[in-house]
Image (tube, grey):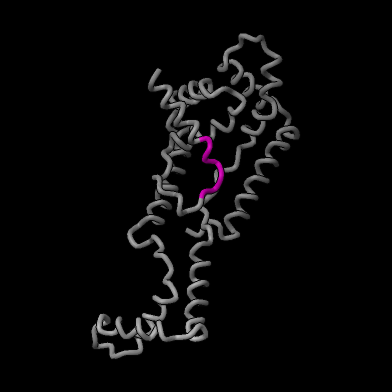
Amino acid sequence: MIVMSRFTRFLATVAKKSAPVPVKQQKRKPATAYALFCNEKFQELEHLHIPERVRAIFKEWKNMDSDSKKKYYDQAQDYKAEWQQRNKKGAIDKRPPTSYNLFIRKFISERDPGSSAREFIPAAALKWKSMNAVEKQPFITESQALSEEFNKPKFVRPKSATSPYAQFIKAKYNEVRKSLPSDTSFQEISRQMSATWKSLPEQEKNVFVEAGQREMQKKKEYLEDGNAEQ
């Protein structure tokens, strides 16, 4: 029971991570294949209580063959490569320089390149103190521009669009469940859902297919707008 409780909390946490998250807050390692599978199924089974979802998801993953799991392993590998690229040594942005830092750099660059920078720091500090607001303004303006650029939120890839079948489940699960005896097991309801989906005319399936395509288009537009810069 303790293991199940921890697992339940884990899945509940995964389910909350559906919205894009700023890169600066992305400190955790990328999701595993199983975590991606859990996230997808959590959305599909949102009509169930968490313990029911946990049992159903775990059982389905356990019974899946390697070919069915492959897409999750491939996606996990893509996220891992993206995460490694984003977090490789030297990839983390340094905080932008202050107006005083910018002045120091300029002051030193105009001096003898063969001399030590330490020699000029006291003189630079005195010079900065003696400058009026107009003389300092170019450095202040540049510093503000760099700060604004640094503080722009940079978003990682949003969650995958929900599949047509997942949208069908959301829309029709309660209807199918009510048509069956009250003691029908979740596994039997799932089989009925699958059979109902397979028997749908293509015209009716297209409603859910088009909804999935709209989500994919939103994701594509999101990425093209520069929200996945990393």
Q: Residue at x 71, y 27 (%)?
A: 200
Report the label total: 0
| Above or below: residue 101 compared with residue 115 | above
- Identify the image quadrant of residue 166: top right
Of 220 and 151, nearer the camera is 151
Residue 16: say if magenta. Answer: yes
- What secondary structure do most residues of the magenta stretch adopt? loop
On the rendered structure, is 136 left or right of 214? left
| Above or below: residue 211 compared with residue 126 | above
Of 37 and 86, nearer the camera is 86
Q: Residue at x 59, y 15 (%)?
A: 188
Residue 226: say if magenta. Answer: no
- Identify the image quadrant of residue 77: top left
Residue 193 position within the rendered picture, expressed as x and y whole percent measured from the top left: 64, 22
The residue range painted magenta reads: 15-21
Toward the right, the furthest residue is: 203
Of 181 and 138, nearer the camera is 138
Q: Residue at x 56, y 22 (%)?
A: 49
| Above or below: residue 56 compared with residue 225 | above
Residue 78 position within the rendered picture, expressed as x and y whole percent measured from the top left: 44, 48
Q: Residue at x 66, y 9 (%)?
A: 181
The N terminus sits in image quarter: top left
On the rendered structure, is 1 left or right of 214? left
